[in-house]
Image (spheres, coloured by chain):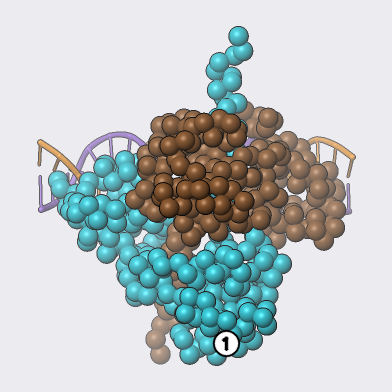
Chain colours: A brown, B cyan, C purple, D orange
DNA sequence: CGTTGTGAAGAGCTTCACAGCG
DNA sequence: CGCTGTGAAGCTCTTCACAACG
């Protein structure tokens, strides 16, 4: 499925950067740029050129020495490396504000994902249609997951219900969970979980700002 | 403002973990748990206990030997360390689907942030009221930022307009930018930027899954 | 000639192991 | 006695420097 890895270990940070490269390469492709060097790509991504070459080398030799990387080919290669050269089928659980926004979001398919089912335990929501999908009861998740070939679950419930949602997903044999709820969840070892919480980034901002200003103050002692 | 840092360098990863600790500690506080050891907190956060002790030690000595950490006090200390023991005033630029969701989101204040202005360059949107805020023209950003004491800008424009939005924010003397748009932006060195893109986490999931399954296949050779 | 791919050096982060202390 | 705080060891990731090559 994904050729990946040369069976070496690949740093988690590398994967995160591949997503960045993909973003920038997509923009370049839209401008019909055909070839790019690691140096110019590095500048656009704000990383070290060697880093890019090493990251890519984990998965194969995609470049041409003396020339650079072919943009469309590199996009394809990175997608293959990440395992997104196909469509992954996704279920969403928790049809609140955030859940509805995601269901209506048009950008999933372009990135290799498709939401094919929505669940919520609120009886007043069950049966509603959101973005063309009928909201279903989590108790019947297992059969829906089987019938619809769902591989990824997105949790968008309130924090206090995240664990229950996760239990439903695991019970339904889903192995990959993306958790937007502001709570940690406990899962067996063979389940993969990723957390999304933009406040983490907010805190990173305020912290960097505080540190930065404190250092400025040092360099420019009062008066 | 933030006592922070002992002037040592603090790993970026530490900041990200502090945000996690805060999340778990908040949940514990709601259950009226008063004291917790690094070992039990570590289990809940899925990290190494030494890691927690070291992370906290960067900012001070918050624990009691032989006992553990006082939950409410530790929450307060972490907030001070991150610089969120006060309210940060925020502007949002790009009142599309995502922008509107964020404007309506009730959870900001509790975490130390308040959106006090919304901008969009679409003349059909300017003058509309969303979540109690009037949508304003980005050209007048500078004066609004000054008058409203705004310190952070959130970009929720389409990718192709992210750079222009950033330019507006920088022009208005904003130093901290949270970028939800799927595009890298170029900024001067004294500006702090954080990127939010949940597809990065999606890719991390699919990748881990592919690798995991490939290794499983190796261990269980066919037949 | 210019840029990639890569071993080796360097930097940074995590984990260990235990002294210090309530 | 138990848990924190921390120096030192270990490990991983990043950067450098240059050989390899179209």
Residue A98 visible in the shown view? yes
Which one is in front, B94 or A164? A164
What residue is shown with label 1?
B142
In the image as oriented, which residue stretches furthest toward the top?
Answer: B223
Which one is in front, A130 or A111? A130
The chain identifier of the residue carrying mark 1 reads B
Q: Residue at x 50, y 88 (%)?
A: B146
Residue B169: % across, % down: 59, 78
- B72 above or below B1? above
- C21 above or below B80? above
Q: Quadrant of residue B118?
A: bottom right
Residue A205: % across, % down: 47, 66
Q: Is residue B155 left or right of residue A162?
A: right
Which one is in front, B200 or A132? A132
Which one is in front, B68 or C15? B68
Residue A156: % across, % down: 47, 51
Residue B198: % across, % down: 56, 53
Q: Residue at x 32, y 67 (%)?
A: B80
Q: Residue at x 53, y 56 (%)?
A: A100
Q: Quadrant of the image for the C terminus of chain A?
A: bottom left
Q: Quadrant of the image for the N terminus of chain A?
A: top right
């Amino acid at each position: 499925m994904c050729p990946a890895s040369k069976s070496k270990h690949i740093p988690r940070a590398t994967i995160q950067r591949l997503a960045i490269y993909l973003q920038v390469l997509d923009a370049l492709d839209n401008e019909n740029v055909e070839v790019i060097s690691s140096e110019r790509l590095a500048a656009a991504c704000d990383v070290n050129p060697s880093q890019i070459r090493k990251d890519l080398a984990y998965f194969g030799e995609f470049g041409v020495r003396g020339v650079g990387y072919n943009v469309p080919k590199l996009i394809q290669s990175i997608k293959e490396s990440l395992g997104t050269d196909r469509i992954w089928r996704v279920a969403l659980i928790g049809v609140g504000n955030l859940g509805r926004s995601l269901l209506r979001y048009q950008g999933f398919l372009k990135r290799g994902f498709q939401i094919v089912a929505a669940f919520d335990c609120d009886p007043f929501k069950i049966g509603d249609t959101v973005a063309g999908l009928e909201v279903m009861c989590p108790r019947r998740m297992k059969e829906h997951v089987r019938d619809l070939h769902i591989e990824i679950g997105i949790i968008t419930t309130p924090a206090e219900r995240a664990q229950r949602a996760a239990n439903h997903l695991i019970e339904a044999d889903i192995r990959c969970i993306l958790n937007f709820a502001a709570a940690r969840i406990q899962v067996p070892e063979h389940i993969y979980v990723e957390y999304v919480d933009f406040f983490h980034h907010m805190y990173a901002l305020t912290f960097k700002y505080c540190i930065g200003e404190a250092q400025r103050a040092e360099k420019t002692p009062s008066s």
